[in-house]
Amino acid sequence: MNTSVNAEEIMALLDRLYEQSIHGIAKVSPPIAVLANDYLQKSTSVDAAAKKFIKYQIAKCTTSGFVTGLGGLITLPVAIPANIGSVMYVQMRMIACLAHMGGYDTNSDQVQTLVYACLAGISIDQLLKNVGIQFGTKFTTSMVKKIPGTVLTKINQKVGFRFITKFGTKGLINLGKAVPVVGGVIGGGFDFAETKIIAARAYKMFIQGDFTVLSDNGKDTETLEAD
């Protein structure tokens, strides 16, 4: 039986994960606003809160049983291994929380699409340049609001194709069984190291306003340590 996933189904998966990331899962994870504000209230600055949050999230991802425990609680619209959905949920929620900390409206289509782009690690600079938005200056929440729907659609298309390529390369789309988990680290490419890279990318984008990590010349950085 062919269980391959197309671009439309990938976007449905991301939309479901984003909704659950923002609103949380009962008895498991609070809404993004609650989580972000808790760190902000206990820190001296947004930057300090973000770094502490990242450090905790990375540590949590390596905890044995944490990711596997999410598997039965996350409802997905497509048939992918529960472990993969769990890791994508943790990674997306981490990005969205950093966006909230940075003052971005996580309920907006623009921020939702940028969270997807951050998760996928795609280049979006040329698409934004085509509508007069330059990467040479620090991105602000007001600049993000100006990204038109036509560009969001094109970004989402790139995101969908990136995940199809990524999953196909790793053989995840056609798996009929769960990817093995050892100590909370996921096989098949979704692992501790990748989560660190995504965290650093999200920090640069939403805390520092540096979107060059999503440019053709952008380079992912190492994870950040809390002060």
Image (cartoon, helix red, strand yellow):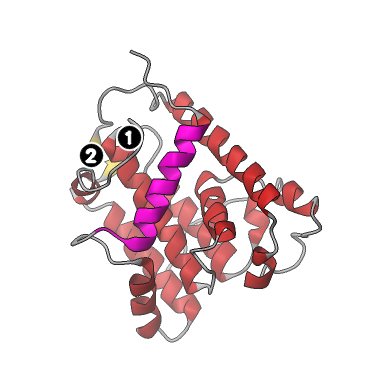
Whichever of callouts 2 and 1 sits on the residue coming sooner in the sequence is: 2
Q: CA distance from mark 2 to mark 1?
A: 8 Å
Up/down of 43 relative to 86, above or below: below
10 Å neighbourhood of mark 1: few (<14), some, or many (≥20)?
some
**Which amino acid type corresponds to the residue marked 2 in the rendered image?**
Val
Residue at the image position 28 percent from the left and 22 percent from the top: 176
- Marks 1 and 2: in contact by CB < 8 Å? yes
Check disc 2 and report the residue beneath it.
182
User: As rendered, which of 87 and 133 lies closer to the eye?
Assistant: 133
Q: Position of residue 5 (x, y in %)?
A: 44, 27
Q: Is residue 162 visible?
A: yes
The quarter of the picture where the N terminus appears is top left
Check disc 1 and report the residue beneath it.
187
Give left or right: position of 83 versus 169: left
User: As rendered, which of 173 and 191 lies closer to the eye?
Assistant: 173
Q: Position of residue 112 (x, y in %)?
A: 52, 56
Image mark for residue 215: none
